[in-house]
Amino acid sequence: MGNLFRISTPAALAVGSMLLGGCAPTTVGVTSRASDYTGKPTRMYVLGTTGMGWNSDFSMAFSAKFREVTRQCGVESAYDEISGLELDSSALTGRMRTFGADTVLTIANGGGVVNTSGGRLSINYGTTLTDVRQNRAVWKGKYTFSRGGTIIPIEERAAVLAIDITNSLKKDGFLTGCAQIALGQNGRLDPAAVPHAAAGGSNGLAGATGKNGTNGAPRPVPPLAAPARPTTAATLRDLQDLLPSK
């Protein structure tokens, strides 16, 4: 999804000064929802790509913050991810059923901007919320997300993306009974609000509770180097193809 752009040297210098500081651009997002949909998620299975285009620290911090926010809204969530190379989706769909998902949120990434040395400055994300019982998409979103200043921990930026997406779900009526979360000055978060994954930790599914009260089995996420290009990332079609059948 999206195209990859290289930023010119003069523009890179201008952006570079921001990146070296502690500022982070506001995420730009647009969403749409099915006007006839009246359901309310209670168990949301979140499916992303490996490292979400950054690295495992990012995806683990994202899943922890996402789960924290949804629980504040009375919704249990679990995070899982794919590489796009899966030949058999039965294990994934089995985990979804064990969790008892009534909705599946897929998050695909691609495109964005890299600088002349190959460093990633931004990524485009596409989100789709699918009602499992009705087997149809009921909400979609598109987000342009920037890395921000390099002194900002990658876990903080991951938490911000989780807040951006959950704020959209709140605004559109899928997460109710909880207020949208405002970011601090320069798009920053209080350090106390940033989850930090322990070394060798597991993904968000491990911390989730199954429908019958069982815990999902831990599945360690191996360390990943931040990719220079998103061309090998799983696509939105890859994610949608792995959804459980009706």
Image (cartoon, rainbow, N blue to C red):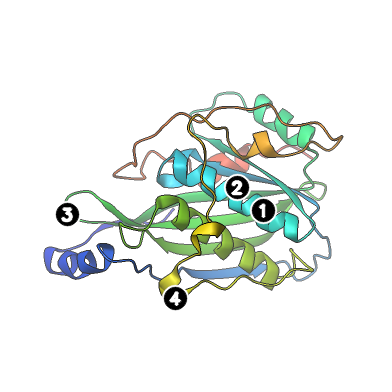
Q: Are marks 4 and 3 in contact (CB under 8 Å)?
A: no
Label 1 near label 2: C-beta < 8 Å? yes
Q: Position of residue 129 (x, y in %)?
A: 67, 55
Q: Could you tell me how far apart the alpha carbons at marks 2 and 1 are, in whole angstroms?
A: 6 Å
Residue 203, quarter of picture: top right
> Where does the image place residue 212, in percent across and percent down from the top left?
87, 34
Q: Is residue 37 above or below residue 226?
A: below
Residue at position x 27%, y 63% in the image? 19
First in sequence: mark 4 vs mark 3: 3
Looking at the image, tell me whether mark 4 or mark 2 is earlier in sequence order.
2
The residue wearing badge 3 is: 116
Could you say where residue 193 lies in the image, as x and y percent from the top left?
Answer: 56, 59
What residue would you read off at disc 1? 68
Tag 1: residue type? Glu
Is 81 left or right of 217, judged from the image as shown?
A: left
Mark 2, secondary structure of its residue: helix
Camera-nearest residue between 61 and 34 = 61
Task: Please tell me whether mark 3 sits on a helix, a strand or a loop.
Answer: loop
Where 90 sits versus 175, above or below? above
Return the residue at label 4: 185
Amino acid type for the residue under numbered disc 4: Gln
Indicate the secondary structure of the residue bearing disc 1.
helix
From the viewer's perspective, is residue 87 above or below residue 152?
above
Residue at left offset 31%, top offset 62%: 149
Mark 1 and mark 3 lie on one chain; the one further toward the N terminus is 1
* Residue matched to label 2: 64
